[in-house]
Image (cartoon, rainbow, N blue to C red):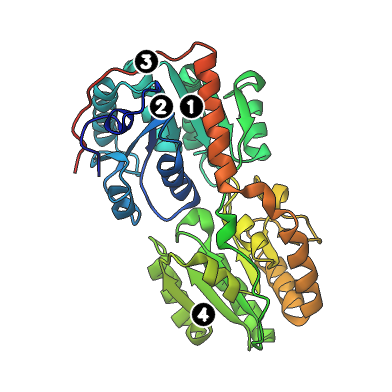
């Protein structure tokens, strides 16, 4: 939902020259990049910044965006699957909005919106273009041709990128190694969580062990590996409970596997949930089976709740989880190794508590409000460096 067309400062009698920042993301699903982007645009200091959000028209967070009071454009052409005709339309739609809105900064997120948004921003003459890397769009599961194509696209659009913000050192190093970014125009800015929402459950008295995962059901997250770990654990520790929070394209395959193995009564599929802090407090172990990642926000969420993590050693995971200290890290697809780690934690309450405390001690570095303040400082730095020009008066009517 957009505003009434008048800039926030004018409506409130504020005379400061605000910086108009347009954030662009492919869709508003319940993921870390999406939640952090929505949090950013709703928590920027409105006396200094005028946020605008461009995104696809679908996703569980669309209703929240409409109700946020931030000026939003919901583009039906902007979708995740690759579709040349639709992607060309999305480019034109984004460029049309940017040419009318005339933001001083465009800040893109995710692979599709990152490529189309930066191209459109450059074509619209936007002075500064920032891209947040929440994990790269290329990954080890792709074929050589597809991976080469995505790397080539990232290298091309990097020419129009003023600044890269990577959520992990691993993503930064990968971008440097592939010649996508340089040390001159890239830095790490971790995705944050609302630390005040998370805290340990000091009153746990239940018996048994609950193992949880929070993720979109898509190949990247490998939810069937979670089910396979559950099969192995339940064969030796039948009292263990498993909770899979999320939804997505792989749900039918997950449900079929549960029926085939007869473990449905021990595995709960909750669907999308918004009460993640409460769910985290109901877990004894977080199990995360991703094949590739940036640095998922469920790690600091589990750390802030003082529960140990069993996860795959991909991208930024070792930057959050200290192997053997706050959790266990296994190779992607190592279902047997993850099962052994879960069994060890299920049988050793003192180990769970010790690892949980170690993670809790590291959680302070993921404060989402500090993340927003850091972005504001970067936007102001661009102004002080003379890169930005005043945004034009007037704006287009948001898409409904």
Residue 18 falls left or right of residue 373: left
Label 2–label 1 contact, CB within 8 A? yes
Q: Position of residue 314 (x, y in %)?
A: 65, 49
How far is mark 4 from mark 3, CA to CA?
55 Å
Q: Nearer the viewer, mark 4 or mark 2?
A: 2
**Residue that numbered label 2 is attached to:** 106
Residue located 52% across and 57% down the image: 221
Residue located 68% across and 72% down the image: 339
Residue located 80% across and 69% down the image: 354
Label 4–label 3 contact, CB within 8 A? no
Q: Position of residue 70 (x, y in %)?
A: 32, 41
**Residue that numbered label 1 is attached to:** 130
Q: Is residue 59 or residue 398 the one in the foreground?
A: 398
**Residue that numbered label 3 is attached to:** 390
- Quadrant location of the C terminus in the rendered image: top left
How far is mark 4 from mark 1, CA to CA?
41 Å
Which quarter of the figure has residue 113?
Answer: top left
Q: Nearer the viewer, mark 2 or mark 3?
A: 3
Label 4–label 1 contact, CB within 8 A? no
As displayed, is residue 71 above or below residue 323? above
**Residue that numbered label 4 is attached to:** 267
* Dot 4 alpha-carbon crowd within 10 angstroms: few under 14, some 14 to 19, many 20 or more: many
Q: Nearer the viewer, mark 4 or mark 1?
A: 1
């Amino acid at each position: 939902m957009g505003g009434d067309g008048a800039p926030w400062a004018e409506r409130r009698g504020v005379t400061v020259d605000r910086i108009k920042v347009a954030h662009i993301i492919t869709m508003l699903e319940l993921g870390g990049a999406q939640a952090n982007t929505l949090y950013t645009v709703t928590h920027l200091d409105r006396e200094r910044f005028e946020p605008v959000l461009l995104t696809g028209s679908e996703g569980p967070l669309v209703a929240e965006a409409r109700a946020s009071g931030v000026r939003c454009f919901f583009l039906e052409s902007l979708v995740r699957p690759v579709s040349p005709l639709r992607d060309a339309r999305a480019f034109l739609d984004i460029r049309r909005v940017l040419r009318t809105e005339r933001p001083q900064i465009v800040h893109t997120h995710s692979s599709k919106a990152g490529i189309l948004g930066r191209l459109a921003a450059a074509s619209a003459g936007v002075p500064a273009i920032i891209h947040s890397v929440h994990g790269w769009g290329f990954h080890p599961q792709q074929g050589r041709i597809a991976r080469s194509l995505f790397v080539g696209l990232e290298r091309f659009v990097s020419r129009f990128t003023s600044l890269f913000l990577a959520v992990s050192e691993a993503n930064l190093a990968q971008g440097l190694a592939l010649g996508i970014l340089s040390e001159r125009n890239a830095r790490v800015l971790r995705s944050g969580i609302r630390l005040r929402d998370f805290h340990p459950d000091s009153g746990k008295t239940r018996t048994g062990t609950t193992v949880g995962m929070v993720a979109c059901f898509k190949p990247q997250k490998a939810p069937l590996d979670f089910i396979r770990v559950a099969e192995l654990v339940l064969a030796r520790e039948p009292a263990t409970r498993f909770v899979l929070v999320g939804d997505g394209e792989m749900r039918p395959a997950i449900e079929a596997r549960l029926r085939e193995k007869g473990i449905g009564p021990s595995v709960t599929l909750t669907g999308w949930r918004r009460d993640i802090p409460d769910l985290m407090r109901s877990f004894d172990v977080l199990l995360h089976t991703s094949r590739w990642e940036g640095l998922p926000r469920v790690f600091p969420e589990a750390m802030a709740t003082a529960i140990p993590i069993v996860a795959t050693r991909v991208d930024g995971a070792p930057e959050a989880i200290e192997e053997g200290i706050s959790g266990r890290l296994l190779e992607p697809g190592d279902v047997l190794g993850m099962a052994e780690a879960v069994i060890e934690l299920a049988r050793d309450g003192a180990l769970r508590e010790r690892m949980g405390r170690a993670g809790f001690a590291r959680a302070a570095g993921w404060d989402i409000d500090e993340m927003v303040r850091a972005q504001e400082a970067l936007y102001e730095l661009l102004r002080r460096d003379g890169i930005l020009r005043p945004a034009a008066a007037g704006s287009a009517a948001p898409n409904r």
